[in-house]
Amino acid sequence: MELRDRRILVTGVSGFVGTHLARELARRGADVSGTGMERDITPASVTEGTINAYAAGLDITDAGAVDDLVARRTPDAVVHLAGQSSAARSFEIPVETFRINATGTWNLLEAVRKRAPRARTLVVGSGEVYGPLPEGTRAREDATFNPVSPYALSKAAADALAELHGRAHGLDVIRTRSFGHTGPGQEPRFVVPSFARQIAAIERGGVEPVLRVGNLEVARDLTDVRDVVRAYALLLERGGSGEAYNVCRGDAVRLTEVVRLLAGRSRVKVRIEVDPARVRPADVPWLAGDPAKLERDTGWRAEIPFERTLDEVLEEWREQPATG
């Protein structure tokens, strides 16, 4: 599907990934509209002119509101990003996480079925659905799901709902199992910007030179968000209907190495301390994916070096004004 002049609706467009995706789709000539929970904050993608309509304050769990939105926009394609995206947070709000991620996906798919049944719909999921893997291995799309957090369980349910709507109703649905991604604009509740923000604050002075971390023994497959949204655009153009795709670099990095690389970029010496509050109740020691299917069907490759991503995230936090 050629994206130029196509009407593309992005749920969660005001979030970290959504803002980057709006830029990528606009660069390809798409007519982008989006939704977000924010009522009083104008997303950067609006002020940049990369989206043409923004529905503020949309609750994805409100079936009537979602149905009305899809009816008004009559999109040629939909990208579903809206959701509760933190596995750590999901242990604190498990029911709400499931309601947002699973019920919200159901509401959107039902709205597409009724109001835009020919729209290509990309449901963005998570590689965390695979759960713990043997060290050194990479999950393929046919791997069994083994979720170990409420977040991963909610994403496994959303994946199944998307597959069901494709088979039962003939919708043009593509699913992703997106592994970890980071980059400029990510909230500091996630690991890389959390470390970068702490280092930037230490460099400014006035705080103890201690970098507080969680479990560093885990390994994650981390990709730059700008490579990830390029994959989403290519899947809209070239992905196979009804298929699931891993979106990942294909190579896990231990968080000990992430900390080492960031600490090595610090302008002052920092000390590393484990903060028990940052350790999840359950974690996945090793999680990496196999991107071969995505690469074969779309020609995508991860292009941005991980160290460049770290440089840019750290520099972003260095430019932030000091807070009390």
Image: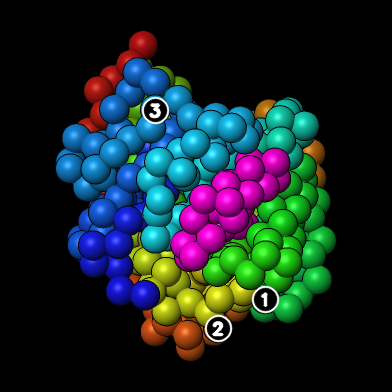
Give the foreground label among 3 and 2: 3
Residue underneath mark 1: 141
**Real-space Cα separation, disc 1 to disc 3, in angstroms:** 35 Å
The part of the chain drawn in magenta is 101-126
Q: Say which of 316 and 90 sits in front.
A: 90
**Residue 259 placement, left or right of 225:** right
Are the residues flagged by discs 3 and 2 in contact, CB closer than 8 Å?
A: no
Which label belongs to residue 56?
3
> In the rendered image, which quarter is residue 73 located in?
top left
Residue underneath mark 2: 293
Position of the N terminus by quadrant: bottom left
Where is residue 146 drawn, in percent x and y? 82, 61
Q: Name the outermost residue toward the top.
A: 324
Are the residues flagged by discs 2 and 1 in contact, CB closer than 8 Å?
A: yes
Where is residue 305 drawn, in percent x and y? 34, 68
> Is any part of residue 290 visible from this angle?
yes
**Residue 64 placement, left or right of 169:** left
Instruction: Write the residue at 49% across / 36% down.
Output: 68
Where is residue 265 drawn, in percent x and y? 33, 49
**Real-space Cα separation, disc 3 to disc 2, in angstroms:** 36 Å
**How many numbered badges does the structure rendering display?**
3
Residue type highlighted by circle 3? Ala
Q: Say which of 117 and 34 sits in front.
A: 117
